[in-house]
Amino acid sequence: MAWFDWPFILSSVFAQLSIGAFLILGSVIFSGKLCFGQTDRLHKTMPVLWMLLFASLALREINLVLSQTHSVYSFSIEAMIVTIFFVLALLYWFAEKALIGSDATRKVMLSVVLMSGLVYFGHGLMQRSEQWLVAAHFIATTLCGGTLFAHTALVRAEHKVEEVNRYLPLLGAVIAVICLLTGIPQLADLASRAETYNEISPFVAHVLSLGLLLAAVGVWLMPIITKSKPVLHVMTFALALIFISSYCAGVGY
């Protein structure tokens, strides 16, 4: 994609971050480590996810309608999976907010949402499997970026689970390092392409993406390094870095 394809890029980034974040948040909720008050505060942060998912679908569809052209970047199956996930997640969220049904019923609903999120991740990985660099960026945005987004939401909800502050950044760091180590060798192909065809934008975009991913993880790990509690503004800054990283990755496709 090019820089001017920003609606499609933002659409993908919004969906990947939101679904990745919910996979982590849903897993934390499912673990039962959050008390009722913490879970309630966490649910109050979730409208941000719903707004991003809505924006993702709206950007994709509005741009296609206005352009009135078929785009190779329009993954109809992926959009359908995102829509299904969005609907299921909203149903679960409303059930939790209104305390509809038993705890077991709501856990089943949560499990279904998590399964649909895993289907999205699996499908997205298959769609991008031909180019590992593209797949690595997808993993980085969905899993690493999603984990960071989820951790930010948990910090905003004032959670009290210390394991979350320790393990989520480490999980994100491991994912980022794997993506970085596997993505760097692929840059040689982009460098060769830039030299041969004078197409430097993809190379620059991917270098920026990997660099910002590393910077975001570094900021994210600072509370562990300094042995302090994570604070919202630092987490938000790291999230902004990984968002820009994901956008640059989309430009480089």
Image: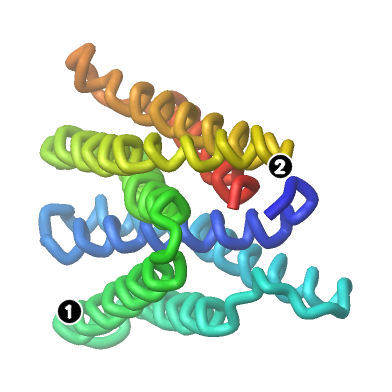
Compared across the picture, whether 8 is left or right of 214 comes to right
Q: Secondary structure at mark 1?
A: helix
* 231 vs 61, nearest the viewer: 61
* Res. 185 visible in picture: yes
| Coloring applied to the structure | rainbow
Q: Which mark is residue 103?
A: 1
Residue 68 place in picture, x, y as percent: 87, 79
In the orientation shown, which residue stands out farthest toward the front? Answer: 196
Residue 104, given in percent of the width and then of the height, sits at 14, 83
Identify which residue is drawn at 63% across, 71% down: 57
Taking depth in this image into account, of 111 and 38 the one nearest to the observer is 111
Kindly tell me whether residue 158 is visible in this rendering.
no
Locate the N terminus and report the quarter of the image it occupies. bottom right
Task: List the residue tagged with mark 2.
Answer: 197
Amino acid carrying label 2: it is Tyr
**Rendered image quadrant of residue 25:** bottom left
Q: Counting other residues with Cα less than 10 Å from the Cα at mark 2, is it few (<14), some (14-19), or many (20 or more)?
A: few
- Above or below, comparing residue 243 to residue 225 in the picture: below
Q: What label sits on residue 164 in the rendered view?
A: none
